[in-house]
Amino acid sequence: MPLAVLILAIVEIAVFVGVAQLIGFGWALLAVLVLSAAGMFALAREGKRGWRRVREAARSNSPVGPQAADGIAGAVGALLLFVPGFFTGVIGALLLIPPIRKFAARRVQGITEKRVPSNVAGDLFGPRQVRVQRTPKAAQPTETDEVIEGEIVD
């Protein structure tokens, strides 16, 4: 983790220097401050919005996992926007765009489903969707119990 933070710091400094050479140091500094302020407001908005959606899902007895995953994706995007720097700011802003946010939320859900027991994942995200592949008629067992082979696809 410390190596990743060091690399991120180097990237942020390099991007800032590049932007400062293009538009000037003062404007680059002002842009970073504006991005951070936007991130602060977005973080407050995303936190409230995510919490409200999770509570509404819980009240309606539907799985709260999809709303929580979406809230986490939005909060991470806002947090990255809040961190001073152009690189993290751009990534954070991208995470707030609905199609990219949906993709990130699905990734959060997939990672969570792999890390928690299946009964907990079912409670959080509802029934899992699986792809079932049946064996051909000639190869099916003659017993009365039907066996369906399948795999879980994320």
Image (cartoon, helix red, strand yellow):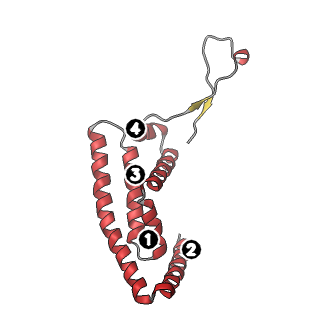
Dividing the picture into quadrants, the one containing residue 3 is bottom right
Image vertical order of residue 80 relative to residue 13, above or below: above
Name the residue rendered at 73%, 15% in the picture. Answer: 138
Spatial CA distance of label 4 from label 3 is 17 Å
Whether residues under marks 4 and 2 lie with C-beta atoms below 8 angstroms apart, the answer is no
Callout 4 crowding tier (Cα within 10 Å): few <14, some 14–19, many ≥20:
few
At which x and y percent is residue 39?
35, 69
At which x and y percent is residue 147?
62, 20
Image vertical order of residue 76 relative to residue 63, above or below: below
Q: Which of label 3 and label 1 is nearer to you?
A: 1
Residue assigned mark 1: 89
Disc marking residue 3: 2
Q: Which of label 3 and label 2 is nearer to you?
A: 3
Secondary structure type for disc 3? helix
Of label 3 and label 2, which has the lower sequence position? 2
Dividing the picture into quadrants, the one containing residue 45 is bottom left
Q: What is the count of numbered marks? A: 4
Spatial CA distance of label 3 from label 2 is 29 Å
Q: Which of label 2 and label 1 is nearer to you?
A: 1
What type is the residue that disc 2 sits on? Leu
Of label 4 and label 2, which has the lower sequence position? 2
Disc marking residue 142: none
Residue assigned mark 3: 70
